[in-house]
């Protein structure tokens, strides 16, 4: 459902802590050298910042008695330090941000790489728009972590630790007092941090859900408008976007509260300590320079703690995002290639066989879409699959390509079980014309070449001629190089089908699968395409799902399906003579095709 809430917290079993960020390590490991260099630059700048107050104390305490030459040395040294700080900071920024961009690019590629190979069962559950949102917005969060938060965190941890040690040296008594307030600061950070992470993940989930919803509505914008569904679609999207805003608002509020508590605690602590320190100076227990040095360190340490709480929030957000991306990366696929791959036999000579195949779609496990199918298609044979809508014909075509595995029984090609071969290997030897022709936002020429990316322009054109597409393609403003729009919106249904057929012709594979490939064609183009398909089918093992008698009659054999079972098979004449479902369909459903003959 479009407005179903995003997955709830309890549904996730993965680790509950910021430790999820550790899952990013495999992506960072290859760039260890860059990380060490960045760490070096970072340590350098942190150390330089820590040395500065020492120099300040010397200047303050010796200001009156010191010779001018010594003063000049101090200021010369200060310039050197400034240069070091500048170079170190620039290097840290460059290395760290570059590392972040690199790692995020790798993560994006890894997620896409995984998603493009997932079987259809996965996409029955996840909306594609949602996956896109993960790849774009969730990775952006990770970028902010690797590209800045982590380095800010490290820098501040160094300053915090170094600052504390130096504070200790400056005045052990005052430092002891400062440390007393630390627990008071840590508690709100931990408690509110936990809430932050939950809110952040909720926020990302709502963003992803609204993206999924928006992409679905936009992809079918004409249907939405035709049914004047805009208000409802707007309402749904607005509702989800508002929800993501509300969770973002709660997150920001929590973080503001945390910042307020922490800053107040830190600075009131510093003020209190100073108060005591001022008295110590009065009583001669401390020099003014020492107190100045102490104050600078105390402010640096306090600033570091403040920065760390900010970063903590960022890390919490990124942990949520990482969790979602890791979920995608580790998503189980119902269909997988075997570890020991069997080579694909010569499919020009191999038959396709279904042995006692029972199949239930994973999304509907109680219904058998196919129920005890036994079917052998001999090499070179043309078999037509007919039957009422929903009988299971398309399911047969999908199983031959191993988009799903049978629930029971086995499917073999050339005697080898599909599950024993690599999917990409045997799909190479299959050409499909699907029920809904899939056209990409590219030129007509490239759409045909999709069937065989290495094909020459001449091959593309001869395939188009065979598919009766050449004439309409050359009549387009830019001919074969005309842009056809997203999903082929600039083409008619019949034109799209002919491009899909040309693509299959170009693929030149020994197994040809046609799923109502000519249903949108007019009688004239259909008979032209029909001739091409027959020509093609002569030397190939062909399965045709068809509703038209003209197509069906020419097949070597006709298989009649009903409710997931094979109810009859034979030639057109023998099936008509049986006077069963086929004869009935032939009289009713096929009449349009018959009339067109
Ligand atoms: N992804 C899916 N999840 C669950 N059930 C499905 C899925 N796809 C199809 N089905 C169901 O499986 C049955 C067989 O569908 P199939 O697409 O094979 O029918 P068909 O014979 O090709 O019909 P048509 O002639 O209308 O294309 C139908 O009842 C359908 O509702």
Image (cartoon, helix red, strand yellow):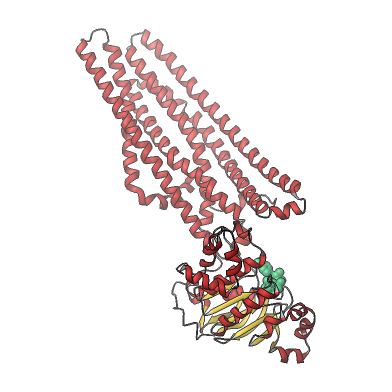
Give the image location of residue 483, x and y in percent. 56, 57
The image quarter containing residue 561 is bottom right
Asked if one can make out residue 179 in the rendered structure from this viewpoint, the answer is no
Q: Quadrant of the N terminus?
A: bottom right
Residue beneath the point at 57% across and 82% down: 535
Camera-nearest residue between 115 and 145: 115
Q: How many marks?
A: 0
Camera-nearest residue between 234 and 248: 234
Residue beneath the point at 63% across and 58% down: 490
Give the image location of residue 50, x and y in percent. 33, 26
View quadrant of ligand 1: bottom right
The image quarter containing residue 48 is top left
Camera-nearest residue between 442 and 272: 442
Camera-nearest residue between 380 and 206: 380
Q: Is residue 345 left or right of residue 487?
A: left
Asked if one can make out residue 447 in the rendered structure from this viewpoint, the answer is yes
- Relative height, residue 197 to residue 538 (above, below): above
Give the image location of residue 206, x and y in percent. 63, 46
Q: Is residue 278 left or right of residue 206?
A: left
Q: Quadrant of the C terminus?
A: bottom right
Give the image location of residue 562, x and y in percent. 73, 79
Residue beneath the point at 61% across and 38% down: 248
Q: Is residue 504 left or right of residue 214?
A: left
């Amino acid at each position: 459902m479009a407005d179903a809430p995003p997955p709830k917290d309890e549904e996730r079993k993965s680790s509950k802590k910021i430790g999820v960020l550790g899952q990013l390590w495999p992506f960072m490991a290859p760039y260890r050298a860059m990380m060490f260099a960045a760490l070096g630059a970072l340590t350098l700048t942190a150390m330089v910042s820590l040395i500065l107050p020492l120099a300040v104390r010397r200047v303050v305490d010796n200001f009156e008695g010191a010779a001018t030459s010594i003063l000049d040395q101090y200021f010369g040294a200060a310039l050197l330090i400034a240069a070091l700080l500048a170079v170190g900071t620039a290097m840290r920024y460059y290395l760290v941000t570059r590392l972040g961009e690199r790692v995020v690019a790798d993560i994006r590629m890894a997620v896409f790489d995984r998603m493009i190979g997932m079987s259809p069962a996965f996409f029955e559950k996840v909306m594609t728009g949602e996956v896109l949102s993960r790849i774009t917005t969730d990775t952006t969060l990770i970028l902010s972590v690797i590209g800045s938060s982590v380095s800010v965190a490290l820098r501040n941890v160094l300053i915090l630790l170094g600052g504390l040690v130096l504070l200790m040296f400056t005045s052990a008594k005052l430092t002891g007092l400062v440390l007393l307030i630390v627990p008071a600061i840590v508690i709100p950070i931990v408690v509110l941090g936990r809430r932050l992470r939950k809110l952040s993940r909720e926020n990302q989930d709502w963003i992803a859900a609204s993206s999924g919803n928006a992409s679905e509505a936009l992809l079918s914008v004409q249907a939405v408008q035709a049914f004047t569904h805009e208000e409802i679609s707007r309402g749904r999207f607005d509702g989800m976007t508002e929800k993501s805003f509300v969770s973002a608002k709660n997150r920001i509020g929590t973080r503001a509260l945390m910042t307020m508590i922490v800053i107040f605690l830190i600075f009131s602590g510093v003020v209190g300590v100073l108060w005591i320190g001022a008295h110590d100076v009065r009583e001669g227990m401390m020099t003014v320079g020492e107190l100045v040095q102490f104050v600078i360190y105390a402010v640096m340490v306090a600033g570091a703690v403040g920065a760390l709480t900010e970063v903590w929030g960022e890390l919490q957000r990124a942990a949520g995002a990482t969790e979602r991306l890791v979920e995608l990366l580790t998503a189980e696929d119902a269909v997988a290639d075997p570890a020991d791959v069997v080579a694909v036999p010569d499919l020009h000579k191999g038959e396709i066989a279904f042995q006692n195949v029972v199949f239930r779609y994973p999304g509907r496990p109680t219904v058998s879409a196919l129920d005890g199918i036994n079917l052998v298609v001999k090499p070179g044979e043309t078999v037509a699959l007919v039957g009422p809508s929903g009988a299971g014909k398309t399911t047969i075509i999908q199983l031959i390509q191993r988009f799903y595995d049978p629930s029971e029984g086995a499917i073999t090609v050339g005697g080898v079980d599909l599950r024993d071969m690599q999917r990409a290997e045997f799909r190479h030897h299959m050409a499909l014309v699907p029920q809904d022709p899939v056209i990409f936002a590219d030129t007509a020429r490239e759409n045909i070449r999709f069937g065989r990316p290495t094909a020459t322009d001449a091959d593309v054109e001869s395939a188009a001629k065979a598919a009766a597409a050449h004439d309409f393609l050359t009549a387009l403003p830019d001919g074969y190089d005309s842009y056809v729009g997203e999903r082929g919106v600039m083409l008619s249904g019949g034109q799209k089908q002919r491009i899909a057929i040309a693509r299959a012709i170009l693929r030149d594979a020994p197994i040809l699968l046609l799923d109502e490939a000519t249903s949108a064609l007019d009688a004239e183009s259909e008979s032209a395409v029909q001739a091409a398909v027959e020509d093609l089918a002569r030397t190939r093992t062909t399965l045709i799902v068809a509703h038209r008698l003209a197509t069906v009659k020419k097949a070597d054999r006709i298989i009649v399906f009903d409710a997931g079972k094979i109810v009859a098979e034979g030639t057109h004449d023998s099936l008509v003579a049986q006077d069963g479902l086929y004869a009935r369909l032939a009289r009713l459903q096929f009449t349009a095709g018959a009339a067109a003959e």
